[in-house]
Image: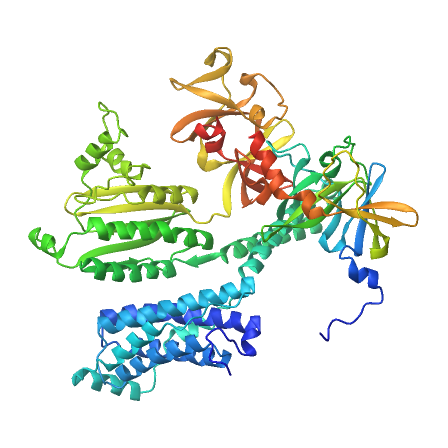
């Protein structure tokens, strides 16, 4: 009990979604993922294609001696693909999958900043009324008049989904 | 202090202490097992008795310290038995050894439970085994005083517990987390790549400074040496694995009532950790098969004029970059006629087929040969042998059987020294580079146009030394744009999958390289035709090809 000292921001305590986020840009939208998930950020390097994988799996890269898969978030979200530029980044995130931890690279247009998002700034994902499933959206954060989409990167990367598609294609 | 078996005291909540205990007690237990088996061979072996005593004594002390009562209790009771034996109250019999082994197995299970607790955070299911305790206590009562041996024993124990010479050797080794080791190997690999990038930098060639060149050459020598050393750290002697078999042989020999002696050769032979771990199961199957089916009963052996005690031999040796392991017995050998008949019944062999002796022996590895009606009554051999073969193939090894009727059978295993490195041929298709394991390559050539023929203008065949081989175009399998669609402008690699030869068409051969195999990770593990990834000389990732999956049934 002694550890449960009250945090100054009671909203933050109430909302487990509050915390530090890394924001990045895809097209015209700004997204954010929990900083705790991020292992490192690197410029785009040469990616080795892997056959029989879904289009959003760009291939594999060498992360200091480890081979890790790289996913293009634009393709994953059904946005048009874009030539990689000097601003394009690979965010290496840690994904939990059935108790195992694995690293995955995520290609984004541009990395912006690390933000402290308060619980009071977060709103639930609106119902779009089209029956669109949005399981990987944690919510929306309005910060200085701009909307940032909070992503549950674990759900986005859900390896089982990649499996499923790979299985269907094979 | 609660008496609940699951209750842990304050200290036992410290995962680090528990982990240290599990590691240390585990080592003592595996040593205890070896010494017990030695004691079983020679009940007067006082040194072994002392070593076993010390092992249980240490475990008892540590467990008491951590409040692991059930463990402490079992260790204590065993210690009592051993102490009585040490003082010459009775002589250790195989019955005592059985009980102590049972106790040791209980402790092994308890350690496993503790380990699980560390991983999952759940309270361990450390239940006291009253039956076991009772049987240990009972065995302490079996006092059968014998004059001569105890005298010798107490004389020895009076002469101070001998510190075995191994102690000195132990101090020379330290324990390292395998994860750290793997990380080191990864980093060394990266260092070699970085070093070679610097060395081949075009700016450097332009500079033309002899001193710089000399220093760089020195650097590459050192990095190569560091890499070699790092790789060798993953190697462990096969001793542990072989000794595990001693226990198996003892148990089986008591269960089947056959007298079996196990002989071990080349225990110091070193091989990759990963291989040692994956070899335990197949080796156990083979030893079990030898004893169950290969070795005759004592009566049969006497009739055949053989020594009543049968012999199972395990032998390990290095040979030309491979490790050879032999499992042999001096039993009745394989009955080729019987195997062939059974295989015909099962439809594994066509009626008219002419098979060589080794072809026939290999039939026991056929799946389905073993599982249904076993032919154990006469020559046996076949229970789970397809599993053995599969495991060995997975380790990129080969297995062969030799047998002489009435004189025994031998399994020969040929395994690579390490799973981590393969010799690869770097081949290019379009802009992509792939690694083809050299071990899978039979030959390579550029075909002449007239050697190529098509079937139904779709499937291609090529004539190689008088036989027509199907062609698989890698670029079509992998969806890559090749440099040339014309087969006579590409390179054909003759390889083999499931015993059938075929040609793999690629653009060109780029070079030969030893590569460290890396997993592509959980999500990409099931990519067909790819066995893994490798970091190439330029730091890029190259995919390692898996010929079995590119051709054959799996690829259809």
Task: Mark yes or no: residue B494 visible.
Answer: yes
Indicate the position of residue A12 as horizontal and vertical percent values: 81, 60
Task: Pick whichever, B422 or B549, lies toward us.
Answer: B549
Indicate the position of residue B235 as horizontal and vertical percent values: 46, 56
**Number of dots carrying numbers:** 0
Task: Mark yes or no: residue B536 visible.
Answer: no
- Please indicate whether residue A78 sits to the left or right of residue B379 in the image: right
Q: Residue at x 28, y 68 (%)?
A: B37
Instruction: Report the residue that reaches farthest toward the bottom.
Output: B158
Task: Pick whichever, B246 or A143, lies toward us.
Answer: A143
Task: Pick whichever, B130 or A33, lies toward us.
Answer: B130
Task: Using the image, determine if residue B359 lies above or below residue A25.
Answer: above
- Please indicate whether residue B90 sits to the left or right of residue B165 in the image: left
Location of residue A2 (image quadrant): bottom right
Coloured how?
A: rainbow
- Please indicate whether residue B443 sits to the left or right of residue A41 in the image: left
Task: Using the image, determine if residue A157 lies above or below residue B49.
Answer: above
Indicate the position of residue A122 as horizontal and vertical percent values: 83, 51
Indicate the position of residue A119 as horizontal and vertical percent values: 82, 56
Task: Pick whichever, A96 or B33, lies toward us.
Answer: A96
Q: Residue at x 57, y 41 (%)?
A: B533
Location of residue A158 (image quadrant): top right
């Amino acid at each position: 009990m002694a550890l449960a000292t009250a945090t100054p921001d009671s909203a933050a305590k109430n909302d487990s979604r509050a915390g530090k986020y890394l924001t990045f840009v895809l097209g015209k939208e700004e997204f954010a993922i929990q900083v705790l998930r991020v292992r490192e950020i690197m410029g785009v390097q040469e990616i080795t294609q892997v056959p029989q994988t879904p289009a959003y799996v760009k291939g594999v890269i060498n992360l200091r001696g480890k081979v890790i898969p790289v996913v293009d978030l634009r393709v994953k979200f059904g946005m048009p693909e874009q030539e990689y530029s000097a601003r394009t980044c690979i965010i290496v995130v840690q994904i939990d999958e059935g108790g195992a931890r694995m690293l995955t690279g995520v290609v984004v247009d541009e990395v912006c900043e690390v933000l402290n998002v308060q619980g009071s700034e977060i709103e639930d994902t609106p119902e779009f009324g089209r029956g669109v499933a949005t399981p990987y959206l944690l919510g929306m954060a309005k910060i200085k008049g701009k909307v940032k989409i909070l992503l549950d990167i674990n759900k986005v990367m859900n390896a089982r989904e990649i499996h499923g598609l790979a299985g269907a294609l094979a | 202090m609660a008496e609940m078996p699951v209750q842990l005291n304050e200290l036992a909540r410290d995962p680090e202490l528990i982990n240290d205990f599990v590691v240390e007690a585990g080592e003592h237990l595996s040593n205890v097992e070896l010494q017990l088996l030695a004691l079983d061979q020679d009940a007067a072996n006082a040194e072994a008795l002392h070593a076993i005593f010390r092992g249980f004594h240490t475990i008892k002390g540590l467990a008491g310290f951590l409040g692991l009562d059930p463990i402490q209790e079992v260790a204590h009771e065993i210690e009592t038995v051993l102490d009585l034996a040490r003082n010459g109250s009775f002589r250790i019999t195989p019955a005592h050894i059985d009980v102590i082994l049972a106790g040791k197995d209980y402790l092994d299970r308890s350690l496993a439970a503790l380990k699980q607790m560390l991983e999952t955070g759940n309270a361990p299911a450390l239940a006291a085994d009253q039956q076991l305790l009772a049987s240990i206590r009972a065995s302490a009562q079996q006092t059968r005083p014998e004059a001569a041996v105890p005298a010798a024993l107490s004389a020895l124990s009076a002469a101070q517990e001998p510190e075995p010479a191994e102690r000195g050797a132990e101090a020379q080794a330290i324990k390292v987390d395998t994860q750290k080791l793997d990380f080191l190997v990864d980093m060394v690999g990266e260092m070699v790549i970085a070093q070679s990038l610097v060395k081949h930098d075009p700016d450097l060639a332009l500079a033309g400074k002899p001193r710089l060149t000399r220093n760089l050459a020195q650097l590459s020598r050192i990095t190569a040496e560091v890499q070699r050393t790092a790789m060798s750290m993953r190697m462990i002697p096969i001793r542990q694995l072989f000794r595990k078999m001693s226990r198996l042989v003892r148990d089986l020999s008591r269960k089947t009532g056959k007298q079996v002696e196990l002989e071990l050769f080349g225990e110091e032979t070193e091989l990759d950790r990963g291989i040692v771990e994956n070899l335990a199961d197949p080796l156990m199957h083979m030893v079990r098969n030898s004893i169950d089916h290969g070795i005759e009963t004592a009566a049969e052996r006497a009739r055949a004029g053989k020594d009543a005690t049968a012999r199972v031999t395990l032998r390990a040796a290095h040979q030309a970059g491979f490790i050879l392991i032999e499992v042999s017995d001096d039993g009745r050998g394989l009955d080729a006629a019987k195997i062939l008949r059974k295989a015909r019944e099962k439809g594994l062999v066509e009626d008219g087929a002419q098979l060589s002796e080794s072809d026939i022996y290999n039939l026991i590895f056929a799946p389905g040969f073993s599982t249904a009606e076993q032919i154990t009554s006469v020559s046996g051999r076949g229970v789970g042998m397809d599993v053995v073969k599969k495991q060995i193939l997975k380790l990129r090894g080969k297995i062969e059987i030799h047998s002489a009727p009435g004189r025994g059978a031998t399994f020969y295993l040929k395994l690579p020294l390490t799973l981590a490195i393969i010799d690869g041929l770097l081949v290019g298709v379009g802009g992509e580079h792939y690694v083809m394991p050299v071990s899978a390559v039979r030959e390579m050539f550029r075909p002449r146009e007239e050697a190529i023929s098509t079937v139904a203008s779709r499937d291609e065949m090529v004539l190689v030394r008088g036989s027509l081989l199907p062609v698989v175009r890698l670029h079509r399998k992998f969806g890559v744009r090749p440099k040339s669609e014309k087969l006579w402008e590409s390179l054909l690699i003759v390889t083999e999958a499931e015993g059938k030869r075929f040609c793999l068409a690629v653009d060109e051969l780029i070079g030969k390289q030893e590569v460290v195999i890396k997993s592509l990770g959980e999500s990409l593990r099931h990519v067909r035709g790819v066995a893994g990834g490798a970091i190439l000389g330029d730091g890029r990732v190259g995919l390692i090809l898996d010929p079995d999956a590119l051709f054959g049934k799996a690829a259809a």
